[in-house]
Amino acid sequence: MLQFHVAIYEIVDDPSLDSTISWSKSNKSFIIWNPKELFTKKILKRFFCCNLSQFITELDTYGFVRIEGSDEQLEFGHKQYFVRGKPELLKKMRLQAAMNRMKKSAKKAKARAEAEKNGSMTVRREPRIIIDADEVRMRAMAWMSLSQFYTGIYKVVDDPSLDSIISWSESNKSFVIWDPKELVEKKILRRFFRNKLSHFIKDLKSHGFVRIKGSDEHLEFGHEQYFVRGKPELMIKLRRKVAWGRVKKDLKAAKARAKAEAEKKGCVGDQPSYRKMCLEDARIRFDQIMGHSTKAKTPLENSFRHLQI
């Protein structure tokens, strides 16, 4: 997008707009012959100005001055940097515009300080909010680790344009699939890399969603207490279910590997050192699978009982 002073130069220099805006006889200023045409030809929209007064104030910030003359036309000029046939001078005008803004802001700050001193102006000061950096970091990490499946489901269910297909239930703690065919035909499932409804339902179950019994015509799914309308922050606590069968297989493999290492070192299966090695290897494998999460009471904890000393 062109800068303000460069765009002004191009418009004034455009011969097709001479009836609306053009150079003056001195070639060091320009005249707005028809202000109404500025709106009808949508010239002001190039400068994101809604009316003529905004346009004039913007001219003022770039150092343009109104030249006194005929009251019917508006004539504006610049000291030495806005000249017909010399667009290279516009670079210096940019610096002057920045200086003008700095001077204006300095004047406002000075006037504000004087008003506060005299007591004619009361300033409302907002209380400082102390934020725990560790807490913010932990929250950010939680959002990053949140599965895109949960956020994608929430956006789709919360989209009012899809209410005829999928929407929140009356309780606002579950969602209803009103039209499964439309869900497939409108390619909504492709957001979750699925083409079939059965695969989508499997994904829901693997992510902890449970089908709510009710009408057989519609499919309704909910998730305990962390998938609620208007409370997306609760989704941080959502976690995908772990395939316990695969975990147990990995633990068996870890035990066999520990046993082989113990036999190499001359440890017997009944000795405490062997059992310690098995327990340590299994714990490390468990932490890797669970993503270094904190210990929780899960069915998998029972698999460690036979390894405890």
Image (cartoon, rainbow, N blue to C red):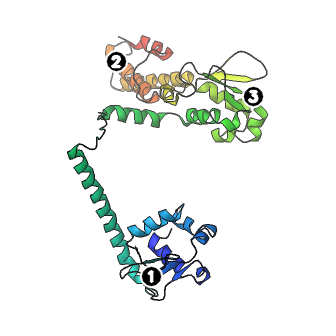
Residue 77: x and y in percent read 42, 79
Quadrant containing the C terminus is top left
Please tell me in which quadrant of the rendered image residue 269 appears. Answer: top left
Local secondary structure at mark 3: loop
Residue 30: x and y in percent read 48, 80
105 vs 6: above or below: above
**Mark found first going from the N terminus, 3 or 2:** 3
> For mark 2, what is the residue?
276
> For mark 3, what is the residue?
178
Q: How many residues crowd around disc 1 within 10 Å: few (fewer than 14), some, or many (20 or more)?
A: many
- Residue drawn at point x = 69 percent, y = 22 percent: 220
Please tell me in which quadrant of the rendered image residue 276 appears. Answer: top left
180 vs 216: above or below: below
**Mark found first going from the N terminus, 1 or 3:** 1
Residue 3 visible, this angle: no
What amino acid does circle 3 point to?
Trp
Local secondary structure at mark 1: strand
- Residue drawn at point x = 55 percent, y = 28 percent: 230
What amino acid does circle 2 point to?
Lys
Name the one closer to the observer, 23 or 89.
23
Residue 245: x and y in percent read 56, 22
Residue 274 visible, this angle: yes
Horizontal side, residue 128 vs residue 281: left or right: left
What amino acid does circle 1 point to?
Ser
Tell me how far mark 1 sits from mark 2, CA to CA: 91 Å
The disc at residue 29 is: 1
